[in-house]
Image (tube, helix red, strand yellow):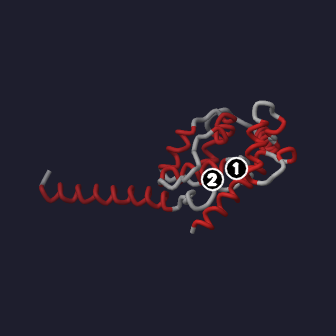
Amino acid sequence: MSFSHLVMTLQHLSVITQLNSHSLMSNIIQARDLSQQPPRSPRVKIGGYPLLARALDKGRADLAGTVGEYHFDCPLDNYLFDFKQVKGADVKDLLAKGATDEEVAKWLDTHGTPRTAEEIAGFAAQVEAARPYDMPEKKQWFIDNCATVGIDPAKSTLFDFLEADDAAVARQHAVAS
């Protein structure tokens, strides 16, 4: 290989590396700063899946170093991951490669346990209606946490609590700013 060909090859590799780095940085830049604002509501569905938008916000923020007090691959995220029998680490790998919300939803459709549209809708209805107040092992935790955000645990779902908690966190960030 001639010297000039070697130089051209190295320049080409440098450009590819810069493009790959730019792609990853672009994805990270698009991540929400969860130290300043909450992730999307657990009710937001992507591809019919509740919890997915929230999990993706947390995963991208984790990759970008802006996850704040939130956690990716937490028990809440795992309601969805367990339903599909996929691993949070695999979803995070997709995000690191720059996958869009829709691409992750399509990936979920084709990986893990196959689910029909009816099964996904049933899962969505079940998780959206989940009431920790009615679960003996979670009742006291739910009562205590609902009190911190001023909602009635006997009338609230888990999603109601998460949205109220996100709103309280957002108010705290607004006051601190």
Of residue 33 and residue 113, the one placed in the foreground of this image is 33
Q: What is the quadrant of the C terminus in the image?
A: bottom right
- Res. 91 in view: yes
Of residue 135 and residue 32, the one placed in the foreground of this image is 135
Q: Position of residue 106 (x, y in %)?
A: 63, 47
- Res. 122 in view: no
Q: Position of residue 10 (x, y in %)?
A: 23, 56
User: Residue at left 82%, top 39%?
Assistant: 133
Element class at badge 2? helix
Pick out the residue farthest to the top.
137
Quick check: marks 2 and 1 in contact, CB under 8 Å? yes
Q: Position of residue 120 (x, y in %)?
A: 76, 41
Element class at badge 1? loop
Amino acid type, residue under disc 2 in the picture? Glu
User: Residue at left 65%, top 38%?
Assistant: 75
Q: Which mark is residue 47?
A: 1
N-terminal of the pair, mark 2 or mark 1, is 1
Answer with the quarter of the image where residue 107 lies.
top right
Amino acid type, residue under disc 1 in the picture? Gly
**Which residue in the structure is indicated by mark 2?**
102
Q: Which mark is residue 61?
A: none
